[in-house]
Image: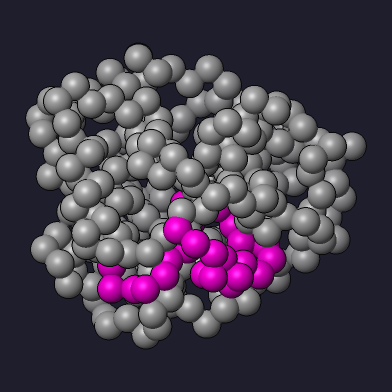
């Protein structure tokens, strides 16, 4: 594999569902995501977890028999770039006013997501580790690069921004090199890290339906948009379902669904769940 990547086994397909794990907390999310993919994805594509050195072996162990693990290094960005995107400075310049990022959120780690363009697959569907797949999504492998859903969770204005929690990609070393050349330029500041960068790099991004990346705040902000029968991917943006947090009571049905996938018992058919009032 290219420099900076090391896989624990060969690829078994030219297509893969890929996620990124940068710490032990996100490994918890990845475990539930992988189970949801096994049960619901409707595809025999490879399952691949990219992970950085920030993840302990104990946290990786439950993932080893569920997916191909690819250790990756953080991107070779400059000291000025790293300082600009350090947690305290980035959150100070671009504060989160609608939700709370968890304490384990390290913004600079997000850029490691670009390593997927170095992977030895022809086609990739990327999913953040805080997502669940509830309905088949294999059709996305036949979508072009770059497809993503809008960042909808509050109102119509959200449609102007994309969310990088679910997207389609075509790994290519030339694309990766071009991304690095644009990413790390003097004075660069990507307000929402990989999300802002990817929207800039792919300005004509193809829009997926919001049901391919349904953000959890829609549950209480836009309940008329929420229908369990339509949702293919559920995304726990901001607060995570394995945390204790201030919005947990408002999101209880979603958290209980995540816990079912995170365990070993039966999981409910999401289509049987009641929609928000």
Residue 180: image quadrant is top left
- Give the magenta part as a residue range: 119-145
At x 17%, y 42%, the residue is 181
Please identify the quadrant where the C terminus is shown. top right
Which residue appears farthest toward the front when viewing the image? 204
Compared across the picture, whether 41 is left or right of 220 comes to left
Total labels drawn: 0
Whether residue 186 is visible to the viewer of this picture, yes or no, is yes
Q: Nearer the viewer, residue 208 or 39?
A: 208
At x 33%, y 51%, the residue is 113
Q: Is residue 60 above or below residue 179?
A: below
Q: Nearer the viewer, residue 122 or 11?
A: 122
Q: Position of residue 257 (x, y in %)?
A: 69, 55
Q: Is residue 37 magenta?
A: no
Residue 273: image quadrant is bottom right
Whether residue 126 is visible to the viewer of this picture, yes or no, is no
Please identify the quadrant where the N terminus is shown. bottom left
At x 15%, y 67%, the residue is 2
Q: Is residue 134 magenta?
A: yes
Q: Position of residue 88 (x, y in %)?
A: 29, 20
At x 12%, y 44%, the residue is 76
């Amino acid at each position: 594999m290219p420099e900076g990547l090391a896989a624990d086994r060969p690829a078994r397909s030219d297509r893969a569902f890929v996620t990124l794990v940068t710490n032990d907390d996100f490994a918890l999310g990845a475990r539930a995501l992988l189970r949801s993919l096994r049960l619901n994805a409707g595809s025999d594509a490879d399952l691949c977890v990219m992970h950085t050195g920030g993840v302990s072996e104990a946290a990786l162990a439950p993932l080893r028999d569920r997916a191909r693990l690819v250790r990756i290094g953080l991107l070779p960005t400059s000291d000025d770039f790293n300082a600009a995107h350090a947690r305290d400075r980035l959150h100070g310049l671009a504060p989160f006013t609608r939700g709370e990022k968890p304490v384990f959120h390290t913004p600079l780690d997000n850029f490691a997501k670009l390593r997927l363009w170095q992977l030895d697959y022809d086609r990739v569907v990327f999913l953040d580790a805080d997502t669940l797949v509830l309905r088949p999504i294999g059709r996305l492998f036949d979508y072009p690069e770059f497809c993503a859903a809008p960042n909808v969770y509050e109102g119509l204005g959200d449609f102007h921004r994309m969310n990088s929690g679910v997207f389609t990609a075509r790994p290519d070393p030339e694309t990766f090199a071009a991304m690095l050349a644009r990413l790390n330029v003097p004075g660069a500041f990507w307000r929402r890290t990989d999300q802002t960068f990817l929207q800039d790099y792919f300005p004509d991004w193809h829009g997926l339906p919001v049901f391919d990346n349904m953000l959890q705040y829609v549950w209480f902000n836009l309940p008329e948009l929420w229908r369990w029968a339509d949702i293919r991917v559920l995304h726990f943006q901001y607060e995570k379902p394995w945390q204790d947090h201030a919005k947990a009571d408002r999101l209880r049905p979603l958290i209980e669904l995540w816990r079912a996938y995170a365990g070993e018992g039966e999981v409910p058919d999401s289509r049987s769940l009641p929609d928000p009032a």
